[in-house]
Structures are given as structure tokens and as C-alpha cells.
Image: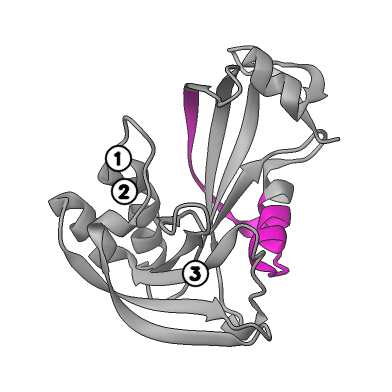
């Protein structure tokens, strides 16, 4: 069973409970949004299997007793199969997130989380990616400046480099034009609001 640390609304540690109970009771906990970027100012979006849309490089809960950077390292390993040293990852922002969602069984999923957004430089070989095919279809590499301009406009297309795996787990790539609507957002969010800070941070770090 998966356990999460939980906190009061001031961020003070209280204890830990199962992930199921955390979301049944709407207890405050931590999540991590993981982003990889390269020295050329490109950023990696994950292609989610459930939506076929582009989201964070990896993301998930911070587990009981785990630091946020440890969670960053674990989520990157679990979702895209890459072993990294996350100790030098850079914090972009911490955002409180509240959402109540009615489930098919009639119960309510209550999410109360501090989403910790970090970026980390990726300088390794893309052939080391090994995607969790239950969750991930691949990665999309786009230029952070071009993506930021796209999200400002709220429409249009940009060039992207697609990274996937074939049935034998070999990395296959293609250049493709992707659309503004390919990028995933939740209800009550805009694409610019969701991604602009992480894109600006990548631009800042690669133009020093």
C-alpha cells in the first residue's frame, strides 16, 4: 500500500495515511512535477497514454518519508526509465492545488496538494529512455521560446521532435508539427497559466 505524508493548511507536518485515505478525506500532501530540458533551450513534454496529450516530463506523489527531489528522481525513473541525479534540480514554483471530482462509483475524489515544480538539465542519450507503456506513449521535445509564444497566442502550431519506442523497445524518432490543442490542461486552467513559468525558467537557465 502506498502511504503519503500529510499536512495542515499552513504546511505543518501532521503524519501519514494511505493514498486512498488522503484523497477520500482531502488531506494536504505534496506532489512533484518533473521537467527535463537541454542546453539548447528545449523542454520535454510527456505524451500521456490516457489522453494522448502532452503534459509534464513526469509527475506524481511525494511518498511517505521522501524528499521532493527524491520523488523527482523516482518519478523520472518509473515513467521514462531514466536514472538521474536530481540533487541539482531547480525549483520553479510551488502551487496549491484543490479539486473535487465525482467518481463513477458515486464517491468524491478530493485533491489537496502542493505541486512542486522542478526543472533539471538533461545531457544524456535519448536512447536511454524506457517508457512505462501503461502510462506513457513517448516524449515531445519542443523549443521553450516557441512553446511560450504559442501559449501566449492561444492557437497555432510549432515544430516538435517526437521520441517513442517500438515493440522491441528500440527508440524511434520523428519530426512533427504539433498543435496548441495537443497540450493538456485541467479544468479551470489555461495553457499559458499552466506552463509559462516553467518555460520562462528554462529560457533563463539556458541563456545565462
Q: Is residue 77 left or right of residue 120?
A: right
Report crowding for label 2: few under 14, some 14 to 19, many 20 or more residues within 10 A (C-alpha).
some
The Cα atoms of the two marked residues, 2 and 3, are separated by 19 Å
The secondary structure type at the circle numbered 1 is helix
Quadrant of the image for the N terminus? Answer: top right
Where is residue 67 shown, x and y percent of the image?
74, 41
Distance of mark 2 from mark 1, alpha carbons? 6 Å
Number of the label disc, if any, that sits on residue 139: 3
Q: Residue at x 36, y 43 (%)?
A: 185
Above or below, 69 relative to 178: above
**Label 1 Cα crowd, 10 Å radius (few <14 / some 14-19 / many 20+):** few
Q: Earlier in the sequence, mark 3 or mark 1?
A: 3
> Nearer the N terminus, badge 2 or badge 3?
3
Q: Disc 1 marks which residue?
A: 193
Q: Position of residue 23 (x, y in %)?
A: 65, 22
Magenta part of the protein: which range? 72-98
Location of residue 102 in the rendering, given as x and y in whole percent from the top left corner: 51, 21
Task: State the image quarter where residue 159 is shown.
Answer: bottom left
How many neighbours does mark 3 have within 10 angstroms: few (below 14), some (14-19), or many (20 or more)? many
Q: CA distance from mark 3 to mark 1?
A: 21 Å
Q: Is residue 22 above or below residue 141?
A: above
Q: Secondary structure at mark 3?
A: strand
- Circle 2 or circle 3, nearest the eye: 3
Disc 2 on helix, strand or loop?
helix
Does 49 sit left or right of 80 as displayed? left
Please name whichever residue, 52 or 70, is drawn nearer the observer in this view of the structure.
Answer: 52
Q: Which numbered mark, 3 or 1, is in the foreground of this view?
A: 3
Q: Which mark is residue 196?
A: 2
- Residue extending farthest to the right is 1
Do callouts 2 and 1 mark residues in contact (Cβ within 8 Å)?
Answer: yes
Amino acid at each position: 500500500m502506498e502511504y503519503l505524508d500529510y499536512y495542515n493548511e499552513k504546511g505543518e507536518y501532521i503524519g501519514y495515511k494511505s493514498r486512498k485515505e488522503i484523497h477520500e478525506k482531502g488531506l494536504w500532501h505534496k506532489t512533484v512535477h518533473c521537467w527535463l530540458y537541454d542546453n539548447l533551450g528545449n523542454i520535454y513534454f510527456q505524451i500521456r497514454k490516457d489522453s494522448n496529450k502532452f503534459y509534464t516530463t513526469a509527475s506524481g506523489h511525494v511518498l511517505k518519508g521522501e524528499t521532493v527531489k527524491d520523488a523527482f528522481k523516482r518519478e523520472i525513473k518509473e515513467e521514462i526509465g531514466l536514472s538521474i541525479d536530481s540533487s541539482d534540480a531547480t525549483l520553479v514554483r510551488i502551487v496549491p492545488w484543490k479539486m473535487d471530482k465525482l467518481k463513477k462509483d458515486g464517491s468524491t475524489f478530493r485533491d489537496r496538494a502542493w505541486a512542486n515544480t522542478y526543472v533539471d538539465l538533461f545531457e544524456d542519450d535519448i536512447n536511454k529512455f524506457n517508457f512505462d507503456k501503461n502510462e506513457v506513449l513517448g516524449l515531445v521535445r519542443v523549443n521553450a521560446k516557441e512553446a511560450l509564444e504559442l501559449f501566449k497566442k492561444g492557437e497555432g502550431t510549432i515544430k516538435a521532435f517526437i521520441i517513442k519506442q517500438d515493440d522491441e523497445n528500440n527508440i524511434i524518432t520523428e519530426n512533427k508539427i504539433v498543435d496548441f490543442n495537443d497540450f493538456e490542461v485541467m479544468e479551470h486552467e489555461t495553457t499559458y497559466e499552466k506552463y509559462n513559468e516553467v518555460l520562462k525558467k528554462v529560457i533563463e537557465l539556458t541563456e545565462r
